[in-house]
Image (cartoon, rainbow, N blue to C red):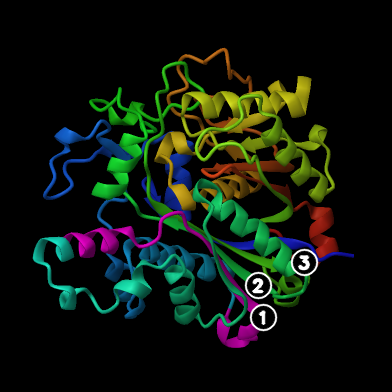
């Protein structure tokens, strides 16, 4: 019998709040974290097609960490450290009492240390002084800098991995952590998604790709509008989310309280295009079907979908088409929300933040609204979408995440009921 895997702690850094409580309060209120980018010093915004983003405001690492670890890493890894500190405290996990070799870290990151990377390469070409490149340039910009510093900061000596599959990175991190615990390679895995790539070069690249919204520069809060007829591209965001995953046996042993169960996962490749999904939705539907099968649940049991829903013209329509293919007439009975409508697309952090929103939907029986769903596009209208928060009892949730490079991920989460809480020996979160 394979091990059951549960969520015992969460932490978040987002454009609508630092800390799970602040994030969820803002999310349920439909508060937008999208704002104007004033400049990319020394670049003015005049040359950029898009001029808005989901930015984490007034973030200073020293407000949250008193150790030197946060000063040694890039902004994205700082976000990861802060989210992880909250998640570990929330879980009640005491690392001093754990076998450190049984605690792993798996991080999903799309871009890595781009803030320092862009700064140092600019200075190198401007000043032509190679000997002045920051001595920590290499360890800071590597994609595994966050997983490394988290392990060092909290003493986790188990499996340490970084997954980079663009927008699906941290959904895959959740899935790989599920496998790691099921296979007995760890008792606990700290799962993190983090990105902070609102930088001059990365932003210019997405603008050149014509992936970003440009019609709502004067009204930033209206720019991210998944499934709406007037959507015209995604909004870049930044942030981090951390979930503490444990085997149910381990959680029982330490009498941990449990938020939800991570029950299933699927990873596929469309092998189709680096940026554009297949328009028939077949591969997306296949990924969701595999995840449900892994969780041993049927489409009829799904109550809620945290959609990938980036607000792109093709992507949203494909996801809606795939949902209808898989769930058929039940598609209009499932509650659906798009977290990116509130915070933008946080790239490698998106799966973890969507995972937290899904856990909270299971736990609180509330589903946050989808902002700016004002004029439903007939190509992707779904009755379960709402501009208002929904009070819904959710037993099974499905998290979707699809990334550049034809990478698809789906994760299934289950409510911890009184019955299976007793079976696991774990008290539920009150």
Q: Does residue 279 sit above or below 136 in this rendering?
A: above
Sequence order check, earlier mark of 3 and 2? 3
In the image, 204: left or right of 245?
left
Sequence order check, earlier mark of 3 and 1? 1
Q: Which residue in the structure is indicated by mark 2?
A: 188
Q: CA distance from mark 3 to mark 1?
A: 13 Å
In contact (CB < 8 Å): disc 3 and disc 2: no
The picture places residue 376, in percent across and down from the top left corner, at: 52, 16
The picture places residue 36, in percent across and down from the top left corner, at: 23, 37
The picture places residue 383, in percent across and down from the top left corner, at: 63, 19
The residue at 17%/37% (across/down) is: 45
Q: Secondary structure at mark 2?
A: strand
* Residue 115 painted magenta: yes
Boundaries of the magenta span: 94-122
Q: Which residue in the structure is indicated by mark 1?
A: 102
The residue at 71%/73% (across/down) is: 255
Q: CA distance from mark 1 to mark 2?
A: 7 Å
In contact (CB < 8 Å): disc 1 and disc 2: yes
Q: Secondary structure at mark 1?
A: helix
Q: Does residue 273 sit above or below 418 in this rendering?
A: above
The residue at 71%/71% (across/down) is: 251
Packing grade of label 3 (10 A; few <14, some 14-19, many >=20) is some
Packing grade of label 2 (10 A; few <14, some 14-19, many >=20) is many
The residue at 27%/48% (across/down) is: 201
> Is residue 430 visible to us here?
no
Q: Which residue in the structure is indicated by mark 3?
A: 182
In the image, 75: left or right of 190?
left
Packing grade of label 1 (10 A; few <14, some 14-19, many >=20) is some
In contact (CB < 8 Å): disc 3 and disc 1: no
Quadrant for the N terminus in the image = bottom right
């Amino acid at each position: 019998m394979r091990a059951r895997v549960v969520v015992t702690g969460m932490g978040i850094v987002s454009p609508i709040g630092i800390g799970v409580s602040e994030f969820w309060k803002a999310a349920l209120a439909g508060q937008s974290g999208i704002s104007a980018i004033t400049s990319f010093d020394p670049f003015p915004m005049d040359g950029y097609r898009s001029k808005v983003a989901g930015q984490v405001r007034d973030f200073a690492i020293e407000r949250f960490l008193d150790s030197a670890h946060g000063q040694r890493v890039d902004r994205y890894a700082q976000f990861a450290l802060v989210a992880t500190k909250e998640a570990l405290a929330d879980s009640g996990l005491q690392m001093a009492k754990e076998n450190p070799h049984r605690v792993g870290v798996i991080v999903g990151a799309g871009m890595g240390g781009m803030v320092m990377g862009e700064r140092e390469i600019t200075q190198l070409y401007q000043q032509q002084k190679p000997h002045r490149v920051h001595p920590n340039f290499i360890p800071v910009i590597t994609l595994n800098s966050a997983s490394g510093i988290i392990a060092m900061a909290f003493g986790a000596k188990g499996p340490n991995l970084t997954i980079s599959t663009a927008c699906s990175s941290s959904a895959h991190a959740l899935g790989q952590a599920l496998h790691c615990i099921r296979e007995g390679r760890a008792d606990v895995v700290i799962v993190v998604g983090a990105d902070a790539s609102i930088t001059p070069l990365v932003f210019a690249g997405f603008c050149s790709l014509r992936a970003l919204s440009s019609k709502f520069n004067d009204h930033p809060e209206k720019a991210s509008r998944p499934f709406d007829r007037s959507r015209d591209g995604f909004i870049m965001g930044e942030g981090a989310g951390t979930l503490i995953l444990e085997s149910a046996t381990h959680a029982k042993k330490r009498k941990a309280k449990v938020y939800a169960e991570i029950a299933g996962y699927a990873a596929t490749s469309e092998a189709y295009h680096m940026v554009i999904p297949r328009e028939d939705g077949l591969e997306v539907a296949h990924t969701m079907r595999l995840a449900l099968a892994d969780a041993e649940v049927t489409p009829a049991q799904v109550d809620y979908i945290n959609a990938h829903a980036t607000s792109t013209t093709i992507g949203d329509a494909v996801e809606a088409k795939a949902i209808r293919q898989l769930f058929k007439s039940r598609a209009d009975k499932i509650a659906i929300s798009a977290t990116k409508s509130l915070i933008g697309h946080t790239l490698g952090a998106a799966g973890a933040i969507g995972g937290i929103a899904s856990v909270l939907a299971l736990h609180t029986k509330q589903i946050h609204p989808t902002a700016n769903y004002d004029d439903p596009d007939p190509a992707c209208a779904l009755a379960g979408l709402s501009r208002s928060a929904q009070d819904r009892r959710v037993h099974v949730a499905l998290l979707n995440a699809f990334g550049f490079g034809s990478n698809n991920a789906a994760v299934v989460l289950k409510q911890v009921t009184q019955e299976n809480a007793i079976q696991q020996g774990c008290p539920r979160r009150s």
